[in-house]
Image (cartoon, helix red, strand yellow):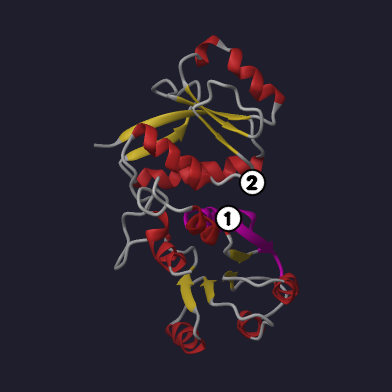
Amino acid sequence: MTQRIFVNVIGFSDVERHALNTVFRLSEERETVYAPWTSSSPEPARMLLIDGDNREARLELDWPGNAGLKLAWVGPDAPAHAWRSFPRPLSWPEVVRSMDELFGPPVTLDVDLEAEPPLDIDLDAAAGPDTQPSQLDAESSKRALIAASGTEDRLYLRARLALAEITLADEATTAIEVLDLIEKNAYDVVLLDFGLPGMNGWMLLKGLRQAPQRIPHIVILKSHPSANDSLRARLTGVRLLAKPPHPGKLQVVLGKV
């Protein structure tokens, strides 16, 4: 039975808010759904999520209407009564995992996967209480490159990476930036929008394949890919997904990183 949990979110930057709203939208596929609380919400909030670095947000603690709500605090100097506190850089999967512990049994955010489960976002198995710190360190050390010109596209891909426990990600908006970044850094996965300005997509892919440090996983995103595109990608050894990528298929790919 589906339950909807409203969260009173106070503070945070526009980028953080966008990432959180993306994660909340993804939760619509689960039995436990999270949504930001507003004055027009049909039910009262059951949780406070406060940006501790925001002075105005801290003042909300004294508002009587928030008394009795579970408090999740982001940043330093968490109040003694805070239920959980999270440091920055913020990992939204960690926040959701903690909320699941409180409000319901953890379940995966993607339920429409085709063949194999996305083990990276199995919230009760991938990072439960018995997970060793070394395992978490190995996950967090993975590095991704998001190559897309659109802000919405980059934020969405960053959110999908975060759900796969890959929170270290660089961004590029042009082909020149991509080539510059792969010269300087080693990446475990590159998400490449074939519509990136500055160079033909196949030429840019060739540059990625010739990077000084081998990139184990390259995912290209292309609008209306043809059968020839799919064959060419397969022969090149990369994964081709239609743009916008199906969330389940993308999560399966990221689960292999």
Q: Which mark is residue 89?
A: 2
Range of magenta residues? 149-174
The residue at 61%/42% (across/down) is 16
Secondary structure under tag 1 reads loop
Drawn side of residue 186 relative to residue 70, left or right: right
* Residue 240, percent from left and from top: 48, 76
**Residue denoted by label 1:** 167
Q: Earlier in the sequence, mark 2 or mark 1?
A: 2
Q: Residue at x 46, y 64 (%)?
A: 245
User: To which quarter of the image does residue 113 belong?
Assistant: bottom left
Q: Residue 90's quadrant in the figure? A: top right
Image point (66%, 32%), residue name: 76
x and y percentages locating residue 47 in the rendered image: 46, 26
Would residue 38 be found to the left or right of residue 4 on screen?
right
173 and 94: which is toward the camera:
94
Q: Position of residue 100 (x, y in %)?
A: 38, 38
Identify the element where label 2 is drawn.
loop
Magenta stretch containing residue 126, yes or no?
no
Disc 2 residue type (three-letter): Pro
Name the outermost residue toward the bottom.
235
Task: Tell me if residue 165 is in the magenta stretch.
Answer: yes
Residue at (45%, 82%) from the top-left corner? 230
The reply to whether discs 2 and 1 touch (Cβ–Cβ < 8 Å) is: yes
* Quadrant of the frame with the N terminus: top left
Residue at the farthest left position:
1
